[in-house]
Amino acid sequence: MAQINYSFKQLSSSSCKKSKNIIIESFEYHPHRGIREKEILTQTFIDASLGNTKITMLSDDSKTIKGKLGLIALSNGSLELENKKLPAIIIDFVFVDNRYRGSSIDIDAKVSQMLLYYAIQKAIEISQTVGIRYLILRPDGGKENKRLVAFYESMEFRYMTDKHEWMYLKLT
Protein backbone atom coordinates (compact mmCIF):
# COMPACT_ATOMS: atom_id res chain seq x y z
CA MET A 1 0.00 0.00 0.00
CA ALA A 2 1.30 3.45 -0.86
CA GLN A 3 1.96 5.88 1.95
CA ILE A 4 -1.16 7.88 2.78
CA ASN A 5 -2.07 10.93 4.82
CA TYR A 6 -3.91 9.52 7.77
CA SER A 7 -5.80 11.08 10.66
CA PHE A 8 -7.48 10.01 13.86
CA LYS A 9 -10.97 11.24 14.66
CA GLN A 10 -12.66 10.58 17.98
CA LEU A 11 -16.38 9.98 17.66
CA SER A 12 -18.83 11.59 20.07
CA SER A 13 -21.35 9.40 21.86
CA SER A 14 -24.17 10.95 19.79
CA SER A 15 -22.36 10.27 16.48
CA CYS A 16 -21.80 6.67 17.61
CA LYS A 17 -25.52 6.35 18.21
CA LYS A 18 -26.56 8.00 14.91
CA SER A 19 -23.91 6.51 12.62
CA LYS A 20 -23.45 3.07 14.20
CA ASN A 21 -25.08 1.04 11.42
CA ILE A 22 -23.56 3.07 8.57
CA ILE A 23 -20.05 2.71 9.98
CA ILE A 24 -20.42 -0.96 10.88
CA GLU A 25 -21.74 -1.78 7.39
CA SER A 26 -18.92 0.18 5.73
CA PHE A 27 -16.25 -2.24 6.93
CA GLU A 28 -15.16 -5.48 5.34
CA TYR A 29 -14.80 -8.35 7.80
CA HIS A 30 -12.65 -11.46 8.00
CA PRO A 31 -14.21 -14.32 5.97
CA HIS A 32 -14.26 -16.74 8.95
CA ARG A 33 -14.42 -14.45 12.00
CA GLY A 34 -16.56 -11.74 10.45
CA ILE A 35 -19.78 -12.48 12.30
CA ARG A 36 -18.01 -12.34 15.67
CA GLU A 37 -16.10 -9.18 14.67
CA LYS A 38 -19.34 -7.47 13.68
CA GLU A 39 -21.00 -8.49 16.97
CA ILE A 40 -18.10 -7.08 19.00
CA LEU A 41 -18.06 -3.91 16.92
CA THR A 42 -21.82 -3.48 17.40
CA GLN A 43 -21.46 -3.84 21.18
CA THR A 44 -18.54 -1.40 21.14
CA PHE A 45 -20.70 1.19 19.39
CA ILE A 46 -23.51 0.62 21.91
CA ASP A 47 -21.03 1.16 24.77
CA ALA A 48 -19.70 4.29 23.05
CA SER A 49 -23.20 5.71 22.51
CA LEU A 50 -23.74 5.35 26.27
CA GLY A 51 -20.46 7.15 26.98
CA ASN A 52 -18.78 4.06 28.47
CA THR A 53 -16.02 3.89 25.87
CA LYS A 54 -14.49 6.26 23.31
CA ILE A 55 -14.06 5.22 19.69
CA THR A 56 -11.39 6.76 17.49
CA MET A 57 -11.44 6.09 13.74
CA LEU A 58 -8.37 5.99 11.51
CA SER A 59 -8.98 7.48 8.05
CA ASP A 60 -7.11 8.43 4.91
CA ASP A 61 -7.20 12.23 4.50
CA SER A 62 -5.89 12.04 0.93
CA LYS A 63 -8.96 9.95 -0.04
CA THR A 64 -6.72 7.38 -1.74
CA ILE A 65 -8.56 4.85 0.37
CA LYS A 66 -12.33 5.11 0.56
CA GLY A 67 -13.84 4.43 3.95
CA LYS A 68 -12.15 3.95 7.27
CA LEU A 69 -9.03 1.89 7.84
CA GLY A 70 -10.00 0.82 11.33
CA LEU A 71 -10.74 1.98 14.84
CA ILE A 72 -9.73 1.66 18.44
CA ALA A 73 -12.01 1.83 21.48
CA LEU A 74 -10.68 2.95 24.88
CA SER A 75 -12.27 3.09 28.33
CA ASN A 76 -11.18 3.47 31.91
CA GLY A 77 -10.85 0.58 34.31
CA SER A 78 -8.38 -1.15 36.54
CA LEU A 79 -5.91 -3.98 36.62
CA GLU A 80 -6.29 -6.26 39.62
CA LEU A 81 -3.05 -7.63 41.05
CA GLU A 82 -2.61 -9.22 44.47
CA ASN A 83 -5.99 -7.89 45.66
CA LYS A 84 -5.10 -4.35 44.58
CA LYS A 85 -6.92 -2.43 41.88
CA LEU A 86 -4.49 -0.40 39.82
CA PRO A 87 -5.95 2.37 37.63
CA ALA A 88 -5.71 1.65 33.93
CA ILE A 89 -6.94 2.56 30.49
CA ILE A 90 -8.49 -0.40 28.71
CA ILE A 91 -8.18 -1.08 25.01
CA ASP A 92 -11.67 -2.49 24.52
CA PHE A 93 -11.29 -3.27 20.85
CA VAL A 94 -8.81 -2.82 18.02
CA PHE A 95 -10.40 -3.34 14.64
CA VAL A 96 -8.79 -3.13 11.21
CA ASP A 97 -10.90 -3.36 8.07
CA ASN A 98 -10.11 -6.72 6.49
CA ARG A 99 -8.95 -5.00 3.26
CA TYR A 100 -6.11 -3.29 5.15
CA ARG A 101 -4.94 -5.94 7.62
CA GLY A 102 -1.22 -6.32 7.34
CA SER A 103 -0.97 -3.18 5.18
CA SER A 104 1.55 -0.46 6.00
CA ILE A 105 0.26 3.10 6.05
CA ASP A 106 3.37 4.77 7.39
CA ILE A 107 7.08 4.23 6.87
CA ASP A 108 7.15 0.99 8.83
CA ALA A 109 3.77 0.86 10.57
CA LYS A 110 0.76 -1.27 9.84
CA VAL A 111 -2.78 -0.08 10.51
CA SER A 112 -2.98 -2.07 13.75
CA GLN A 113 0.32 -0.59 14.94
CA MET A 114 -0.85 2.94 14.18
CA LEU A 115 -4.00 2.35 16.22
CA LEU A 116 -1.94 1.04 19.14
CA TYR A 117 0.54 3.93 18.87
CA TYR A 118 -2.44 6.27 19.10
CA ALA A 119 -3.75 4.48 22.21
CA ILE A 120 -0.32 4.53 23.85
CA GLN A 121 0.11 8.25 23.16
CA LYS A 122 -3.37 9.06 24.55
CA ALA A 123 -2.74 6.90 27.62
CA ILE A 124 0.57 8.66 28.29
CA GLU A 125 -1.13 12.06 27.95
CA ILE A 126 -3.87 11.03 30.38
CA SER A 127 -1.37 9.52 32.84
CA GLN A 128 0.34 12.92 33.11
CA THR A 129 -2.92 14.44 34.38
CA VAL A 130 -4.58 11.65 36.38
CA GLY A 131 -3.42 8.57 38.25
CA ILE A 132 -3.39 6.05 35.41
CA ARG A 133 -0.40 3.73 35.40
CA TYR A 134 -1.25 1.05 32.86
CA LEU A 135 -2.68 0.51 29.41
CA ILE A 136 -4.26 -2.94 29.32
CA LEU A 137 -5.87 -5.28 26.80
CA ARG A 138 -7.02 -8.85 26.52
CA PRO A 139 -5.95 -10.56 23.31
CA ASP A 140 -8.90 -12.02 21.43
CA GLY A 141 -8.61 -15.76 21.91
CA GLY A 142 -6.40 -15.32 24.98
CA LYS A 143 -2.91 -16.73 25.34
CA GLU A 144 -3.71 -19.46 22.82
CA ASN A 145 -3.72 -16.85 20.06
CA LYS A 146 0.07 -16.96 19.79
CA ARG A 147 0.26 -14.71 16.73
CA LEU A 148 -1.75 -11.93 18.36
CA VAL A 149 0.10 -12.25 21.68
CA ALA A 150 3.42 -12.02 19.79
CA PHE A 151 2.18 -8.87 18.02
CA TYR A 152 1.23 -7.23 21.33
CA GLU A 153 4.56 -8.29 22.84
CA SER A 154 6.31 -6.61 19.90
CA MET A 155 4.48 -3.44 21.00
CA GLU A 156 5.92 -3.89 24.55
CA PHE A 157 2.79 -5.34 26.20
CA ARG A 158 3.44 -8.04 28.81
CA TYR A 159 1.50 -10.39 31.07
CA MET A 160 1.69 -9.48 34.79
CA THR A 161 1.74 -13.14 35.82
CA ASP A 162 1.09 -16.49 34.17
CA LYS A 163 -2.41 -16.44 35.68
CA HIS A 164 -3.47 -13.17 34.05
CA GLU A 165 -5.42 -13.07 30.80
CA TRP A 166 -4.78 -9.34 30.43
CA MET A 167 -1.63 -7.82 29.01
CA TYR A 168 -0.31 -4.48 30.16
CA LEU A 169 1.98 -1.65 29.15
CA LYS A 170 3.33 0.35 32.08
CA LEU A 171 2.93 4.09 31.46
CA THR A 172 4.83 5.54 34.42
Image (cartoon, rainbow, N blue to C red):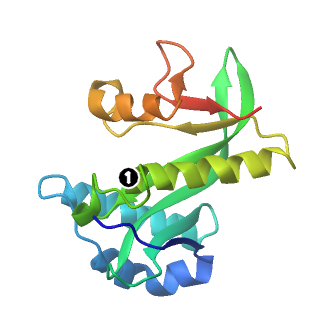
Compared to residue 149, the image places residue 106 above or below, namely below
In the rendered image, residue 88, in percent from the top left (x then y), is placed at: 69, 39
Q: In the image, is 32 to the left or to the right of 170?
A: left
* 170 or 17, nearer to the observer: 170
Q: Quadrant of residue 24?
A: bottom left
**Which residue is outermost to the left?**
31
Towards the viewer: 45 or 147: 147
Going by the numbered disc 1, the residue's amino acid type is: Lys
Point out the residue furthest to the right here.
Answer: 129
- In the rendered image, which quarter is residue 153 located in? top left
Q: Quadrant of residue 65?
A: bottom left
Q: How many marks?
A: 1
Residue drawn at (78%, 51%), measured in percent from left and top? 126
Residue drawn at point x = 45 percent, y = 74 percent: 59
Front-lying residue, 71 or 46: 71
Could you tell me which quadrant the N terminus lies in?
A: bottom left
State the residue position of label 1: 110
From the top left corner, tell me how far across and down residue 6 is, in percent: 48, 71
Q: Residue shown at 19%/52% (left/top)?
A: 33
Seen in the image, is 39 located left or right of residue 5? left
For disc 1, the neighbor class at 10 Å (few under 14, some 14 to 19, many from 20) is some
The quadrant of the picture occupied by the C terminus is top right
Residue 137 locus on image (x, y percent): 51, 39
